[in-house]
Amino acid sequence: MRIFSGIQPTGRKHLGNYIGAIRQYVDGQDRGEAIYCIVDLHATTVPYDHAGLRASVLDTTAMLLASGLDPARCILFRQGDVAEHTELTWLLSAVTAHGDLNRMHQFKDKSARQRELVSAGLFLYPVLQAADVLAYRAEEVPVGADQRQHIELMRDIAMRFNERFGETLVVPEHRIPEIGARIMDLQEPERKMSTTGSSEQGTLYVLDEPRAVVKKLKSAVTDSGREVIRSPEKPGVSNLIEVMAVIRGTDSARIEQEFDGAGYGAFKQAVADAIVEFLAPVRARYAELREDEGALEAVLGEGAERARAIARETLADVRERMGVGPPRRVSG
Ligand code: AQP
C-alpha cells in the first residue's frame, strides 16, 4: 500500500492539523510505503512571506519529525525540490474541467477573502494537489474532512486520464479519520479551526505554551447550559468532547459518561490538561530538532531524491501516453 499526503509549510500547525492529518501520517508508516511532502508551491497561491518561506518549511519539517515521522520509515521531502510535480500539473490540466475547479469550496472561500489578487495558482491548487498524489501512484491519501472534495476531484482527473490515454494512473482513496476529522474553531465552533481563517484565540497551536492552552480553553465558546453532551445545538462542547475522545483514544460516549454532571468549568480544565500532556513531548522534541537546520535540510534532500526516482517513472509514462516530447527511449 502506498500512502501520500501533503502539508502546507506553516510553522504554526494547529490541533486540527495534528489530529486530522499528522497523527495519521505517523500511523501510515506502519501501514505501508509512506510518502509525505511539504507543499511550498501550494503556499505561493495566496499572499505569503517569501523571505520566510524556507524557514517555514524547516519549521514544518521539524514539527513532522517531532510528531514521529522517521525518515528511515517514510519519504519526507519538499514539493519544490521535485520538478515533476509542476510538469504533471500542466499535463493533468488537459483533463481537468474548468467548471469543476470553479466549484471547489476552498477556492470559493479563499478567493472571497483575497483583497488584492486572486491568483491563477489558487484556482489551479487542486490540480497541483492531484499531481502530488498521482505522480506517486499512491493508493491512499490521509487527510482531514475539509479535503474530501479535492480528493474526489483528483480521482476524477485520474479516471479521465486513464479513459482518454489508457490505464496509467492509480485512482487514490481518501483516508479520513472517524473521529477528529474536523476540529472546530474554539471561538466560532461552527467553522473549522484554520490557519488562515481563524483568530488567535480560536486556534490552538501545537507549540502553544501550557498557559496559553489553558487560557484558550477557558475562553472557548460554549452554550449557556452545563451538560457535557454532544448535540447540534452545542457545537462548542461537542468539539471539546471529540478532542478529548481522540486524546484518550476512546469514543465520545465514554467522555460524556465520565464528565456527566461535572459542568463546563471542570470539563474545560480537564481538556486543557489533557491537551498540554498530549502535546508536551512534541513541543520538547521540536525545540531540539529545529535548531539543527543542516540536519533538517539533509532529511529533505535525501527524501527528494527518493521521491524523484518514483515521480520520474510516472512522468515518463504520462508523457509517452500523451504524445508529449520525444518517444520514450527503450533501455538495453
Ligand atoms: N480543523 C481541522 N480539523 C481536522 N483536520 C484539519 N486539517 C486542516 N484543518 C483541520 C487537515 O490538516 C492537513 C494539512 O493541512 P494544511 O496545513 O496543508 O492546510 P489546510 O488543509 O489548508 O488547512 P489549514 O492548516 O487550516 O489552513 P487553511 O487556513 O489554509 O485552511 C489537511 O489534511 C487538512 O485536511
Image: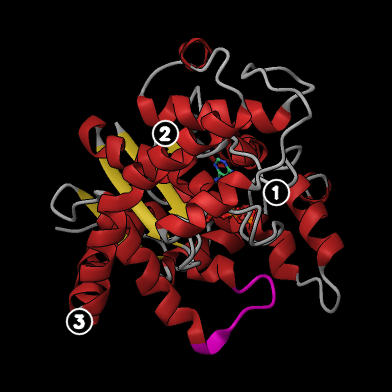
Which contiguous range is marked in magenta? 44-51
At label 3, the amino acid type is Gly
Q: Residue at x 82, y 53 (%)?
A: 108
Locate residue 153 relative to residue 55 in the image: left or right: right
Q: Position of residue 87 (x, y in %)?
A: 51, 66
Compared across the picture, whether 302 is left or right of 228 comes to: left
The residue drawn where x is 26% and y is 57% is: 66
Depth check, front residue: 116 or 4: 116
Residue to which mark 2 is pinned: 140
Of pointers 2 and 1, the one earlier in the residue sequence: 1
Can residue 301 be seen? no
Instruction: Name the disc covering residue 96, or none.
Output: 1
First along the sequence among labels 1 and 3: 1
Which of the labelled discs sits on residue 31, or is there none? none
How far apart are labels 2 and 1 at the CA level? 21 Å
Query: Which quarter of the figure is the N terminus placed in?
Result: top left
**Type of the residue with mark 2:** Glu
Judged by depth in the image, the label closer to the viewer, 2 or 1, is 2
Q: Earlier in the sequence, mark 3 or mark 2?
A: 2
Q: Is mark 2 within 8 Å of ligand 1?
A: no
Q: Give the quarter of the figure containing the C terminus.
A: bottom left
In the rendered structure, find residue 294 and report the number of the disc placed on it. 3
Residue at x-position 28% and y-position 43%: 34
**Residue 270: x %, y % from top left:** 45, 33
Please name the residue shown 46% across and 11% down the image.
254
- Residue at far bottom of view: 51
